[in-house]
Amino acid sequence: MSTEKTEKIKIARYLAIEKRPYLAAAILTMHIVKNNDCPTLGVSKKWVMYYNEDFIDTLEINQLAGIIIHEVSHLLREHCIRAEEFGIDEKTHDVSNVAMDCEINDDLIEEKILKEDGSFPFCTPVKYGFEDNMTWEYYYKMLFKTGQVQQCPCHGNGSGSDGIAKEWEDAEGNGIDKAEQDLAKKLTAIDIQKHVAQIGTVAGQWQRWADEYLSPPKINWRQQLAMSLKSSTIYVSGNTDYSYSRPSRRRIPKVVLPSMRSPQPKIGVVVDTSGSIDQGMLTVAVNELKAILATMSIPTVRVMSCDCEVQSDQVVSSLTTLELAGGGGTDMGVALHEFDKNRNKRPDIVVVFTDGYTPWPSEKPSFDTIVGLLSNGDEHCGVPEWAKVVKICDE
Ligand SMILES: [Zn+2]
């Protein structure tokens, strides 16, 4: 009898892979362990799926395959990490489990992976009067807000969903370490992207999950602006000829080595003062630049305000003393050209703050250009390739 049930779970696992081939890496990485102390079926943080023999006996094989896909969804969506970040504890984990199941099951029912045949009471957003396709964190808040927390059933989920280790889990022994979990997630995300490229679609929210999982970590614009400016500065310093003006500390008798010190890079700033500029975002961006320049000990900067003409051109020691004028049409190329005109006064790097609705010179100026794009959109607004773009956005 017991062998039959072991076979049943194995067959269900293969059936799950057949239904969702792009989840195979994750489904096969999970350990499957019989544990009759587990009330139904649940996953641990260590990627062990425990099952109760009597429980799986009640399920039809397709339904069991659907539940395996449900369980692996908890792991791939990193519910236990999100639960910890959200502060889920012993008192709130049952409610969080209902919310997490809502996040998963609306997709699985729509795709007919799970069927409401009465064998198992699935939690879905519609049962609680919520809309589909939201995050579990949203459903969790809504369960409290609508006073439905008392009606949350306890299905015996494991720490792989709510992050709380259950007494029936083998916390020390069985399981997969983090590196293997990460590898399984990465392979699954790659398989999803391949499936999309070859066949066209994947079910539910998987494509978005894969794209987000594989995209590089988000760096906020403040870090990006500082990094762009500092890397350009290093490049400028590296290009500077050795200077004999200060002797090196590393002396060789009777020989004065050239110093590695290079002159302070000259920095220019262009502020787009055309009518369309969001003043709030501009103030935040200029203040950020001021803070970055202070950390780099840059004593003065040359600042131009420009709409379709250069309206002001000042050398300032602090960006807070700026006088900005303008309000007409837009052409940032005019200011860049002005910076490029006089060889002696030419900066090494120019930062342009603009919303991007401007023409640009076709040729790269003779200095590095960083465009601080004051825009919440995704577009780069035709900024040429020779400029580095940092999107300044509301956070
Ligand atoms: Zn669940």
Image (cartoon, rainbow, N blue to C red):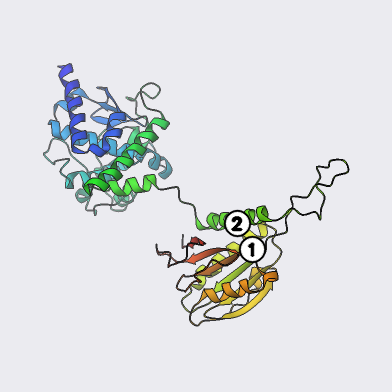
**Does dot 1 land on a helix, a strand or a loop?**
loop
Q: Is residue 288 left or right of residue 107?
A: right
Closer to us: 341 or 223: 341
- Residue type at mark 1 is Asp
Q: Position of residue 395 (x, y in %)?
A: 46, 59
Q: Which residue is mark 2?
A: 232
Please state which amino acid type lies under the numbered disc 2. Ser
x 34%, y 25%: residue: 169
**Ligand 1 under 8 Å from disc 2 Cβ:** no
Q: Is residue 189 above or below residue 270?
A: above
Find out whether the residues at labels 2 and 1 contact each other: C-beta distance under 8 Å: yes
Instruction: Residue under label 1, please give it.
Output: 348
Residue at image coords 17%, 45%: 111
Locate the N terminus and report the quarter of the image it occupies.
top left
Q: CA distance from mark 2 to mark 1?
A: 9 Å
Q: Classify 312 as above or below 364.
A: below
Name the residue located 31 percent from the left edge and 53 percent from the top edge.
Answer: 145
Label 2 SS: helix
Choose between 205 and 60: the one closer to the eye. Answer: 205
Q: Extreme bottom residue here?
A: 328
Residue 157 visible from this viewpoint: no
Counting the numbered discs, the total is 2
Does mark 1's beta carbon lie closer than 8 Å to ligand 1? no
Image coords of residue 231 (percent x, y): 59, 54
**Between residues 295 and 346, which one lies in front from this camera angle?**
346
